[in-house]
Image: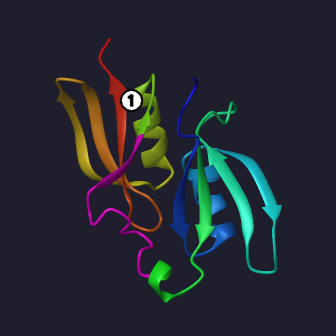
Amino acid sequence: MDRRIIHVTLVVNDYDEAISFYTEKLDFKLIEDVTLSESKRWVLISPNESGDFCLLLGKAANEQQACRIGAQTGGRVFLFLHTSDFWHDYYNMQRKGINFVREPAEEAYGTVAVFEDLYGNLWDLIEKKQ
């Protein structure tokens, strides 16, 4: 049996601003963008072309959802972006204006720094030790 998580919903304020941020600042790929209704779209973004794992961008539809934008995990790191070239990605993200809230550190598991996305969600940028 093959089971895996393929999508996680990220609540956003606006589809287009989120797509721009993730594709232009983090170099994610837009995998799918389908209009479902006047106010709802199916938007998948992925850190790579394969789309093995995607973030589903979900525009907040009510006040309860809107108050979760940027705080889906109560201030803890929410998502973990693994890279095979930490320093390349780190400097590239800095050049593009990504705000790192914790500077790079060497940990037992690898090199890591914490950054925030356009809404304030915290991410780890990690290169695992070999």
> As rendered, which of 52 and 112 lies closer to the eye?
52
Q: Quadrant of residue 64?
A: bottom left
Q: Which residue is mark 1?
A: 87
Give above or below for 44 relative to 37.
above
Left or right placement of residue 32 versus residue 90 in this view: right
Single out the residue that lies furthest toward the bottom. Answer: 63
Segment tinted magenta in the rendering: 67-80
Residue depicted at x 81% and y 69% = 36
- Percent position of residue 87, x then y: 39, 29
Give above or below for 39 relative to 15.
below
Residue depicted at x 55% and y 31% = 3
Q: Quadrant of residue 40?
A: bottom right
Q: What is the quadrant of the C terminus in the image?
A: top left
- Percent position of residue 2, x then y: 58, 25
> As rendered, which of 47 and 60 lies closer to the eye?
60
Q: Quadrant of residue 75?
A: bottom left
Q: What is the quadrant of the N terminus in the image?
A: top right
Give above or below for 62 relative to 41.
below
Magenta span includes 100: no
The residue under label 1 is which amino acid type? Trp
- Percent position of residue 25, x then y: 56, 51
Left or right placement of residue 81 versus residue 105 in this view: right
Residue depicted at x 36% and y 69% = 71
Q: How is the image coloured?
A: rainbow
Please tell me how crowded label 1 is: few (under 14), some (14-19), or many (20+) other residues with Cα within 10 Å: few
Left or right placement of residue 99 versus residue 95 in this view: left
- Percent position of residue 92, x then y: 49, 40
> As rendered, which of 88 and 108 lies closer to the eye?
108
- Counting labels gives 1
Q: Main secondary structure of the magenta part?
A: loop
Secondary structure of the residue carrying numbered label 1: helix
